[in-house]
Amino acid sequence: MNTKLTPQDIKRYNGYIWKFFIGCFAFLVIMIVATILGAFKALPTLSDLEHPKSDQSTIIYSSDKQVLGKWYWRQNRSSVNYKNISPNVVHALIAKEDNHFYSHSGVDFWRTFSIIPYNLIGKTQGASTLTQQLAKNQFTGEKPSKDFIPRIIQKLKELIIAIRIEKHYTKEEIITMYLNTVDFGSNAFGISSAAETYFHTTPDKLAPDQAATLIQILTSTTKNSPVRHYERALNGRNFVLKRMVDEGFLSETDANKYRADSSLKLNFHPTSHAEGLAPYFRKELKEQVTSILKERGVFKPDGTEYNVDRDGLRIYTTIDSRMQQYAEEAQQEYMRDLQKQFNSQYKGVNLAKTITNYDRLMGRGIAASGRYTDLKKAGKSDDEIKEIFNTKDALTLFTWHGDVDTTMRPIDSVLYSQMLLRNAMMSMDPTTGYIKAWVGGINFENYQYDQVIKGARQVGSAAKPFTFAVAMNMGYSPCLMVPNSPVTITGYGPDWTPKENQEEVAKLPPIINLRTALAHSQNFVTAYIMNEVKPEPVVELIKKMGITTKVEPYPSICLGVFDATVYDMTGAYSAFVNHGKWTQPIYLLRIEDKNGHVLYTNTANEKPALSEETAYIMTDMLKAVISEGGTGQRLRSVYGFTNPVAGKTGTTQDNSDGWFMGMTPHLVTGVWTGCDYRDFHFRSTRLGEGANVALPIFAGYMKRVYNDPSLGIKRSDDFELPKKPLGTNLDCAPYDQQQKTAAPAPTNPAAKKITF
């Protein structure tokens, strides 16, 4: 058979070949035109290119310019400017991903055609330019298709968009946009989040080896993860370092030095909403920011509402990261020991017979659990739920030594939770109202209810200064001697006679001055003062000092039978230090959008509550609580405080709540401790009083504050004297030198005008 091709055959075959290439070219042109015209989904407009949309994390800043945390929706993404990105990152990226970046106009045609065969057979190759990758990530968001035609369309879209991007942005802007949007794994989107997550640093401080480690992740965020696949990431880092040498970005000597180190030097800090400082505070802050933007009608330029999880807002707060750290450390340090004290008193005790309302409280605890909610949603009956709660299961429990995996009945875990002491504290600057530290609970991951601003609890003896302040404002002297004996108050319903610890009464003279009575928190003398000044003026003052909960005008409020929050109580005590002016505690200063435009600013409200003279007298009397053997004396005897400090303990009925309100010239701090339900409590006042359950946390906090010179808070600073001379004597005789007998003080005329 003759197989020799004739000239006519060759001509015919050449015609076929030319028709094929012309057809392919025509097909490509048609596809490009169709793509541009939006036949396969509209391409981004010029406005879209100028204002690219991507979710960005909202960042919360402390007053000392530290990042307290972030809010984000699925992606932890933060943006930085080109000048805040280390050149090492830029060099590593270009060397690894696109060495012709500065010479092409969005598409590297030689590179593109070289990888077409690979892409057509389904082998994804990282051959697109950085601009094309940006086009895909930022403007198309389409997953790679395995089908021929859809894949061609996707590539054409990326090519067209990449060319448009190059026309509208500089090379610096393109690389910045790319680094701010790319996924680095471990929920870190963008170079800022990646630097923080993997190395606990900022993008401008990344060394060449750190930059190489991050850039090699981009090939595969899972396979190249330096956390999951260390050796693979190490090899990837070394390859990027080699490419940086090849492209002239790094010397061979430096590269060899980095490659010789087999350590990636990770400082891994995965981010979540619950991690970091002040999680309770950040949760409350988020609610307030969301409310402010909505109620004030603050909208984005396009008229839509801001989303705090997606719009990259910048939130500036009053919290000091150092003080916040000290507050959290002080809580954790002492609560470990206090929980042991609490548990030891119930060893061998039948809780069902000892705890009042035990069955009802356990029922409430079960109903409040996530397990109960899930079982109800699953359609389980009450009997089935009861059986499940009484059947052993694998559980994880919070302890002060870390979470513990164990096997136990869910109902026992509910009891365990009920027996856990809760604690909250807040510290603020009394002159500005700025809150410096906020600890809303013991563990945010497990117990998210905030006890600072939402958990109103009975205040006990911490309320006594309000009644004494009314008396001082009416002209009473702190040195006035009165009987320390039972008082019955009539005219407000049933006759009321407060109880008192007779052992404590016996330690004092039968007649004592008001300063000593407050220092030793004597109920009889407090009731005596209440009988003199009457409840209505006390309620009036309590409200002027910022207590927002309901307080009825009954005599018993002098002993603190009403509820209040740590937030309100700390704000109230600040008026004693701030010359009688109540300053609203604030924690949010400013909200900015991602471009730095101010959306909201905040300042503290201030109003008079007491006269300046009365405020100073009360502060001086509260110093005696610490310095003259009062209920807060262990600040001196145990913790060694000799500097000017004032305060008041508070202990409620059955030792259910323990308080300490601490005052220094620069900070007012409130601390509360108790169980979730009041029926779970300390069995003795010795252990359950505020001096034992709250004061030590204040002490641990303040010792850390004083030991940090960068805060500028000195031990030697004293409370400021009022501008006007005091009209009363503050130099009262100490209780062990007070006279044994004295005539009762005259009743204050009821018609006397009361002014604050």
Image (spheres, rainbow, N blue to C red):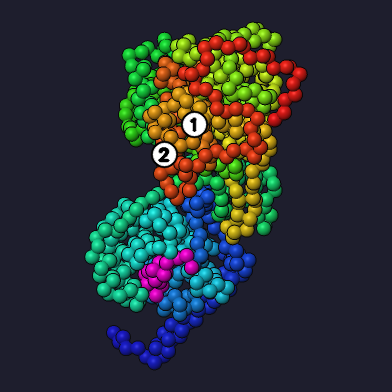
Residue underneath mark 2 = 703
Q: x%, y% of residue 356?
A: 47, 12
Picture residue at 60% right of the left edge, 30% below the top: 617
Residues rendered magenta in the picture: 83-99
Picture residue at 54% right of the left edge, 51% below the top: 58
The span from disc 2 to disc 1 (Cα, nearest Å) is: 15 Å
- Choose mark 2 or mark 1, whichever is in front: 2
Q: Amino acid at mark 1?
A: Val
Q: Is residue 86 one of those drawn in magenta?
A: yes
Q: Quadrant of the C terminus?
A: top right
Picture residue at 34% right of the left edge, 35% below the top: 402
Tell me if 41 is positioned left or right of 117 in this view. Answer: right
Q: x%, y% of residue 43?
A: 58, 66
Residue underneath mark 1 = 671
- Against 498, is 78 above or below? below
Nearer the observer, 377 or 99: 99
Determine contact: label 2, label 1, CB under 8 Å: no
